[in-house]
Image (cartoon, rainbow, N blue to C red):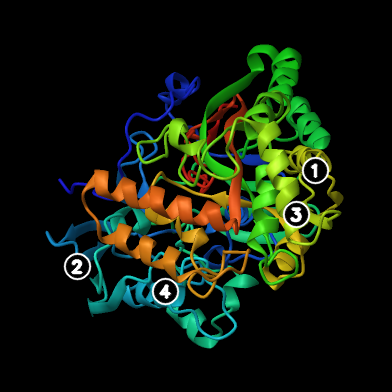
Amino acid sequence: MIRKLGLWVAALAAFAFAGHAANAQTPKQGGTLNFAISAETPHYDPHGSDTYATLHFSAPFYSTLLRFNLDKFPEVEGDLAQSWEVAPDLMTFTFKLQPNVKFHDGTPLTSADVKATYDRMRSPPQGVVSTRKATFGDIGSIETPDPLTVVFKMKNVNAAMLEHFASPWNVIYSAKDLAADPAAPRTKINGTGPFIFVEHVKGSHVAGKKNPDYFKKGLPYLDGFRGIFTLQAAAMLNAVQGGQVMGEFRGISPAERDRLVSAMGDKIRIEESSWTLNLLVVFNTEKKPFDDVRVRKALLMAIDRWGGSQGLSRISTLRSVGGVIRPGSPMATPEAELVKLPGFSKDIKKSREEAKKLLAEAGVPNLKLQLWNRNLAMPYTPAGIFLVDQWRQIGVDVEHVQSDTGKYLATMSSGQFDVAIDFSNLFMDDSSLGLAKYLSVTRAPENRSRSKDAELDKIYDDHMRERDPAKRKALIQAFEKRLFEQGYQQPLLWWHRIVPTHKTLMGWKMSPSHNLGADLATVWLQQ
């Protein structure tokens, strides 16, 4: 058995898998699943995205090399790979592919497609954005000795590499399609997944139909699916309650959960877990006065996270105070150490007095700023309102601007903002993944603070090579200390996941990440 050196994960928070006993029933073929997607994707390409809106839209059409076994999370299992070997020194990964796999256009899948896909992620061509670039920077070369074998040769040890091969974002594209147009996946879909793309009606839905040539025999069970865009929380809840949609796979608030349970009784299934997701406060370090560390630190120090978590956890999916690693996981910074870092003190009165002094020293005692935010009611809107109030208490005048996901991401990526609410959207508890977003923007395009910090980059690289858990944890804390003292960006609060599904919806599996389990291959309807 391959030891998963990259994941120091103990027991995850208990999941309320209420539907698992029912899932033991014999699955039924047929039917169309309608489910809610509370945001519309700005494009179709998971390689260049870090929003769930893209994955919930695109995942059913694609396959990955490996995947996580959600019954034994975080164990990995094969998807397109039927077997694999890892060299003892972690410098070579060899995968044998499933035979007779076809893309939806009828083209056979070969090792060349896997190579082209990973080359695109680790070294994106001109005009292509890869938010996986830093993750796969340790790959030295990719060899394809035969059509069903692909060999990854590493230039550096990456202790979590096997788990990264299981990332749901690493969907496999056709080498033929990429050769014709490297940017094609942004607007065209041609995968090997359980469903074939039917249509995308903007503002309405995405639809897929059963792939009759899917390489996993007997799957999918559904004839098709329709992901319905429900951008307003009230509309989503009404649709779930009325049966127009059978579930929402991202997560709802405690108040929304209580409403559904009260209205639907035993017809609704509720599953809960901690969540590998947080909201971030991000400063555009290329714009004045946010290029001044004193201004950034002052704004972070004015936020009462500990008090805010108590109030926001009652009305939103926001809950836990933590650093760059999910609170409670083995590599997370303990609370006793976290409170010593800028932005995490429990003495908010003292922190705010110091924040006012820093703003005065920076020459902006009466600072005005624009807070850029996503227009999702949960939890972006309450988070934005909270920050406006927090900064008002140190005399900062804030204009809170919200927009749809496409405009929001485009504005963030182009740097046309002052301060923003961003997110760190993880799929597992691994520091190589959790810290990557904070690397210099030249290495990590998803770093929307646009900061460049060679010291952070070096600490990250040192931690990537370190196999001793205690030493690696010390490096994580050194990284965190540097990051928060510079104040480029910082977690606001971590989320708590609550997922509602009708009890007639079977075969879907809960996890601590809304990025996982989105391909719908094993979902079926008890009709």
**Separation of residues labelled 3 and 4 (CA atoms):** 41 Å
Residue under label 2: 92
| Image position of 7 (left or right of 340) | left
| Image position of 64 (left or right of 56) | left
**Element under label 3?**
helix
Callout 2 amino acid:
Thr
The residue furthest left is 88
Callout 4 amino acid:
Arg
Callout 3 amino acid:
Leu
Q: Position of residue 180 (x, y in %)?
A: 53, 87
User: Measuring 49% from the left and 47% from the top, which residue is drawn there?
Assistant: 324
**Separation of residues labelled 1 and 3 (CA atoms):** 9 Å
Which is more foreground, mark 3 or mark 2? 3
User: Measuring 72% from the left and 44% from the top, which residue is drawn there?
Assistant: 38
Looking at the image, is mark 3 or mark 4 earlier in the sequence? Answer: 4
Q: Nearer the viewer, residue 163 or 61?
A: 163
Residue under label 4: 122
Q: Quadrant of the N terminus?
A: top left
Callout 1 amino acid:
Ile
State whether residue 388 is above or below residue 259: below
Looking at the image, is mark 1 or mark 3 earlier in the sequence? Answer: 3
